[in-house]
Amino acid sequence: MIGVVGAGSFGTAIANLIAEKSEVLLYVRDPEKAQSIIKNRVSSNQKLSDKITVTIDIEEIATKCNVLFPIVPSANFRKLMTQLAPFLKPYHMLIHGTKGLDINSSIEITKENPLSRNHVRTMSEVILEETCVVRVGCLAGPNLASEIDKKYPAATVVASAFEEVIDTGQKLLKNDRFLVYGSSDLIGIELCGVLKNIIAIGAGAISGKGLGENAKALLISRGMVEMIHIGRVLGGNINAFLGLAGVGDLVATCTSNLSRNYTVGYRLAQGENLKEISESMEEVAEGVNTINIVKALADTYKIRVPITESLYKILRGDMTVDESHQYFMKFPFSPEIDFI
């Protein structure tokens, strides 16, 4: 039996994919939501496979499943790992699907010690810090949950330092419409999934203002350059950004209204504020928190990230979408590609 932790849209889609080959135990934190899912056999607007069993017992999923796919918002990820840790053993394997960053609160942030890579953790690093699990991996790629649910063709990357983790992820997920690639660059692949959310918010804002496809293509291409500069500071490899988890995921989330981050940008351009948008969304748009973290990191490392800087100001109400467009068009970019 394979465990999936989290019944959001992506967690549910992955659970259904795995259920095509294996029995699945799906952990749902909220008892009321769990009862609704059990009764209706629907989770996040997706019909559940008959091979999926729902549980609210976190010990049960660790006891019955040696392979777990934790897919919960980054804001809840560390807490989840601390709750799961007492029941995990070194033989467990965790492949997460969370595209966000965590701030390690055990390291104090001060004016003399500003936010740096020492404070920031990817989800795989959180797993390693909070549990005894060694074999850790992640999922990343253009994986819009509703399209996976509709059985449209798609692909993902399973990244890990352990070949066994990659092989396991491929065997569990791959089928005739869902390709699964492997990568040993765990941090690089994770960062691709995290950083593209920033650019997706910007792309949504361009669409919301009706600025056209040329402008969106400009943003996506410059956004890729910005992602690489940030990713290198955080320990990522350039190659990861040029593959499926990088440019592939970036294109998908920057061009689809199925993307939560794209939707945030679109609604900002329509005149809504962040509070209104956040309160009305059923699931978290990870890009909002990522913008705040990356802006602080860019300040510390003296990196120019004009897209992130503009979106940071928009989210704070210090700049309008129209003003950011004018600023971006006047920004003195130098060579188009300066990282090779």
Image (cartoon, rainbow, N blue to C red):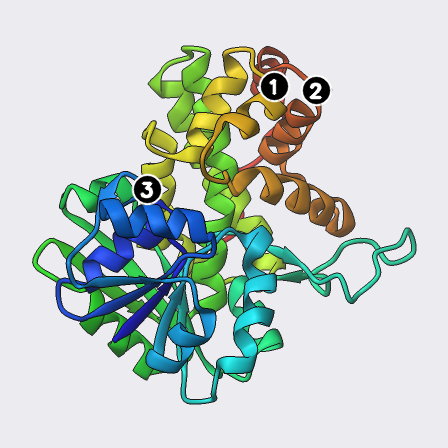
State which mark lies toward you, 1 or 3. 3
Residue 130 seen in render: yes
Provide residue 106's location: percent of width, then percent of height: 78, 67
- Residue 189 appears in which quarter of the rendering? bottom left
Name the residue located 66 percent from the left edge and 31 percent from the top edge. 312
* Label 2 SS: loop
Please report the residue visible at 7 percent of the width from the left and 58 percent of the height from the top: 176
* 22 vs 185, nearest the viewer: 22
In the displayed structure image, the side of residue 76 where residue 295 appears, left or right: right
Between disc 2 and disc 3, the foreground one is 3
x, y (%) of residue 219?
46, 29
Q: Is residue 66 visible?
A: no
**Viewer-side residue, 211 vs 1:** 1
| Residue type indicated by callout 1 | Asn
Q: CA distance from mark 1 to mark 3?
A: 25 Å
Q: Is residue 87 above or below residue 100?
A: below
Residue type of the residue flagged with mark 2: Gly
Residue furthest to the right in view is 112
Question: Callout 3: 10 Å neighbours few (<14), some, many (20+)?
Answer: some
Q: Are marks 2 and 1 in contact (CB under 8 Å)?
A: yes
For disc 2, the marked residue is 317
Disc number at residue 273? 1
Q: Nearer the viewer, mark 2 or mark 1?
A: 1
